[in-house]
């Protein structure tokens, strides 16, 4: 029994094959408290974080763009849209930094990058390469084994989901770094130019598990109107 348990842990740990999802997107077609994607990070324990992704939704209620939880804090690193138009939060170890007046039109693709640095505790959101103000959050390192989820907001490690806070729409190009990207690197991501892929989460070599109603599809606009 114990041997079997160990063998199965080794199997999941060693043999998940990362996939190159370039040109693909995750479609979350239904509101639920189950559908989500779990992402496996290649590093843990962070002194700085950047998470970049692109998304499209028509939600006007609250929703998460990126939920990272540990046993110590379910809002370890959370990018969260509040019910107010253009109002986002970055939560670091439960401490919210609020950002108002950001672009937030329905059915529109946005590039979103969130940064945080432990020394200053400062967090910031960049939408389409344009910066928000910088606001203070948690000061200190983010240590521990993180559970990273797209599509749901974790209130416990890997669970505690609420349909009223689920993401419905599409998400693509998810990357995470263990450092704060420079303004130029964020603008390269926003413009879909060559950028250094995430060293914690890399969309081009993504270690992920789908649970429930989430579909991997071709990015519908990929290749039509690319000017770069
Ligand atoms: C997907 O489409 C959106 C909207 O045109 C675009 O901004 C984004 O770069 C595309 N992603 C990929 C991976 O082609
Ligand atoms: C991460 O931090 C925890 C708690 O400080 C520590 O126990 C663990 O060894 C660290 N892991 C790595 C890979 O550095
Ligand atoms: Ca939570």
Image (cartoon, helix red, strand yellow):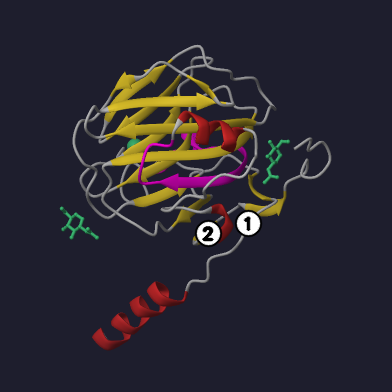
Q: Where is residue 94 in the image (x, y as percent from the top left)?
A: 26, 32
Residue 168, above or below 71: above
CB of mark 2 near ligand 1 (< 8 Å): no
Residue carrying label 1? 21
Residue carrying label 2? 206
Quarter of the image that includes the C terminus? top right
- Asked whether residue 160 is in view, the answer is no
The tag on residue 132 is none
- Reply yes or no: does residue 167 show up in magenta: yes
Answer left or right for 169 relative to 96.
Answer: right
The boundaries of the magenta stretch are: 161-181
Q: Viewer-proximal residue, 146 or 125?
A: 125
Residue at the spot 56% in from the left edge and 55% down from the top edge? 212
Labels 2 and 1 touching (C-beta < 8 A):
yes
Q: Quadrant of ligand 1?
A: top right
Report which quarter residue 93 is drawn in.
top left
Residue sticking out furthest to the top: 101
Answer left or right for 35 relative to 159.
Answer: right
Mark pair 2, 1: CA separation: 7 Å
């Amino acid at each position: 029994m114990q041997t079997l348990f160990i063998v199965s842990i080794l199997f999941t740990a060693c043999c998940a094959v990362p996939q190159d999802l370039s040109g693909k997107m995750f479609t979350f077609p239904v509101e639920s408290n189950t559908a989500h994607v779990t992402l496996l990070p290649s590093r843990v324990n962070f002194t700085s974080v950047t998470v970049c992704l692109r998304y499209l939704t028509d939600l006007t209620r609250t929703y998460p763009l990126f939920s990272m939880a540990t046993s110590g804090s379910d809002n370890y690193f959370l990018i969260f849209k509040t019910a107010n138009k253009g109002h986002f939060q970055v939560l670091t170890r439960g401490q919210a930094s609020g950002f108002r007046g950001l672009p937030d039109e329905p059915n529109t693709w946005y590039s979103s990058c969130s940064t945080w640095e432990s020394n200053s505790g400062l967090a910031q959101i960049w939408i389409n390469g344009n910066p928000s103000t910088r606001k203070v959050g948690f000061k200190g390192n983010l240590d521990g084994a993180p559970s990273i989820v797209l599509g749901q907001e974790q209130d416990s490690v890997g669970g505690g989901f609420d349909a009223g806070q689920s993401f419905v729409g599409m998400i693509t190009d998810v990357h995470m770094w263990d450092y704060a990207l420079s303004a130029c690197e964020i603008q390269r991501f926003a413009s879909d130019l060559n950028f250094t892929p995430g060293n914690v989460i890399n969309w081009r070599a993504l270690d992920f598990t789908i649970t429930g109603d989430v579909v991997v599809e071709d990015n519908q606009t990929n290749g039509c109107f690319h000017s770069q």
